[in-house]
Amino acid sequence: MTAAGVLGGAKEGGRLAHRVLLVRELGIAVALALLVGVTVLVNPRFLTAQGIKDLLLGATILAVLAVGQSIVVITRNVDLSVGSVLGLSAFATGSLFVANPGLPIPVALAAGVLLGAACGVVNGGLIAAARVPALVVTLGTLYVFRGLDHTWAGGRQINAADMPPGFLRMGSGTLLGVPVLTLFAVVVLVAAGYYLRGYRSGRELYAIGSSPAAARLAGIPVGRRVFAAFVASGALAGLAGVLYAARFGTLDANAGNGFELNVVAAVVVGGVAIFGGSGSVYGAALGAVLLTTISSALPVLGVSPFWQRAAVGALILAAIGLDRALAVRLAKTLRGRNGHG
Amino acid sequence: MSARIRGGRAVALALLTALTLAAAGCAGEEPATTAGQPAAGGGAKTIKEGLKIAFLPKQVNNPYFDASDNKGGKVAVEEVKGVYSQTGPSEASPSAQVSYINTLSQQGADVIVVSANDKDAICGALQEARTAGAKVVTYDSDTNPSCRDVFINQASAEGIAASQVKLISEAVGPDGGEIAILSATANATNQNAWIAMMKTELAKPEHGRLKLVATVYGDDDDQKSFQEAQGLLAKHPNLKGIISPTTVGVAAAARYLSGSEYKGKVQLTGLGTPNQMRAYVKDGTVKSFALWNPSDLGYLAAYAGGALASGLITGKEGEKFTAGRLGEYTVGKDGVVLLGDPFVFTKDNIDEFDF
């Protein structure tokens, strides 16, 4: 999945890189299985039907955000505004229902996604026009969007009683045992995964992240692709906002405050290199599931809340260390083969 | 002291003082009251008209302070024919209130009603305002007693703890069982004081059948509170009830229970606002919960401020004043005025409230 594979370089090298990536995702899956296994041994109720539902529901919103974030991170950018976009979209959804109690749910979903995409357009436009690093621009829009949310919401709080029962049922309901909200995340994940792997423009995102200069020389419209990545991230944050409203049922100007760091953590733990060019949305989604499972499992295991954050931090460091080790090893192997070939 | 409204912003603080001044005058004259109005030498027993009473909450864009200031304090200020205003920061941070206090002082406010984001940070500014002639009333969250004239305490820790234990005991039923507490942050002073009092309360023989098995912290964050509620139910299969004395925690726990197999089997009570709890009270997830009435809090603070500015009281223990429709209050130790016992909301009365 590195640029080498994209640009049709050493085929063998590409396959190797793919294998490394697979190992990387497998690693997260194993960690997840271990965590769940140990927790179940300690407390079998962790994996009852209700327990599984809780786990999936818990991971859903973070997973949707992580998919959007990894699309951006793969291009060697970062979108720190997702928490604020989520908050804005969640409050917008609530306000729409307050103003039109009979509003069909698909309309609310579309409105949330569109609002998020509009925020993404602002991000992408600023980054393209001002040629300022995304880190700085989205740090700015993080506050701008949150400020808008505060101005709009004022002191108001939108509560479960203000939203239609059907919408709230979507937030806690299940289809064949799988929470409805999680189905949204699965659709998003599969679509994004398929696009990044199967489409030329999707592959080009990896090339941009591996080496923006080389990608430009290769004729890839870097500006346009990065812009699109931010719009996608914004739209998914908007979708996550609607899901947030359905799940929590209580909304004010602070919904999603501080989410951005969880999202970046999930992406990094999931094996998407923070410097772009490698990783997959599946890994990022797994990372999101792992992080939320940790924070669900630690209370069940009776671990002190003070250790929970430390555990997440240690995991991020471990993930980065592993990435680094794999990258060095891969580079060495590729060099070796090319030398002999 | 604040009830923590969403997201850990302690909400209810600051603006009320000013109101109080204006408000106190009118009421003072009503019937029965006058027994102990100390400073009212020679019959000035009413609150002066035209007092400028300014409310400075912890945070302006917060429903709790909207209720206390604009739906409580303002009413009282109008009753005493004062001039009401509300101002304050949009984020509850300790230093943010200082510049607002300075401005109010320069504008010649007669009363500043403030909910302190930090009990020390605004002290200097408040002292300057008092030197300039303003009376300072704190409400919801106090400063150091030396920095203000009176503090309107929404509820005593004992009162809150007793009502929470009583409500969960009633909800769980006579057989009792295991209960747990879902708190805000592990280092929140007010939460820890309430939890300690609840433990004392639970140790009494009449609550012998209730057994506290865990105290967990949701950090006043929806997601975290959800996960902690899930963890409680997974870890304690025999859990019968949860007390969540924080508005974020109780709403999150209610939302979780209402969508889970535990609905109706595990009881929940806590401190919450009627609007956020309405859906869960009506669908049977929650039988009852408590909170003080923030409008009454603001109303009382306005009257107290009015009484101070009119010289009816000075903040000494034992002084009495009348706060309009709420009746007569007595200043307690350290200039603290207690609003009363927490108010209990059930499905029968919840529709009478909108905050």
Image: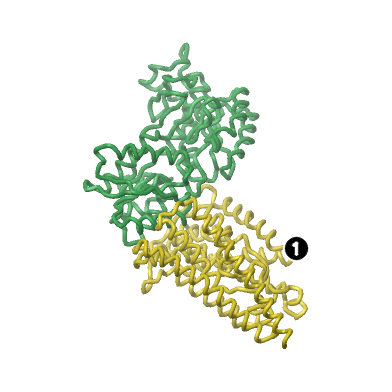
Q: Nearer the viewer, residue A55 or B236?
A: B236
Q: Nearer the viewer, residue B173 or A286?
A: A286
Q: Amino acid at mark 1?
A: Ala
Which residue carries the number 1 mark? A130
State which chain disc 1 sits on.
A
Which residue sits at x=49%, y=26%? B150
Depicted A223 relative to depicted A261: above or below: below
Q: Residue furthest bottom?
A: A341
The answer to which image quadrant residue A233 occupies is: bottom right
Q: According to the rendering, which colour does chain A have?
A: yellow
Whether residue B62 appears in this view of the structure is yes
Q: Quadrant of the C terminus of chain B?
A: top left
Q: According to the rendering, which colour does chain B have?
A: green
Which residue sits at x=54%, y=46%? B61
What SS does tag 1 mark?
helix
Residue B64 x, y percent position in the rendering: 47, 43
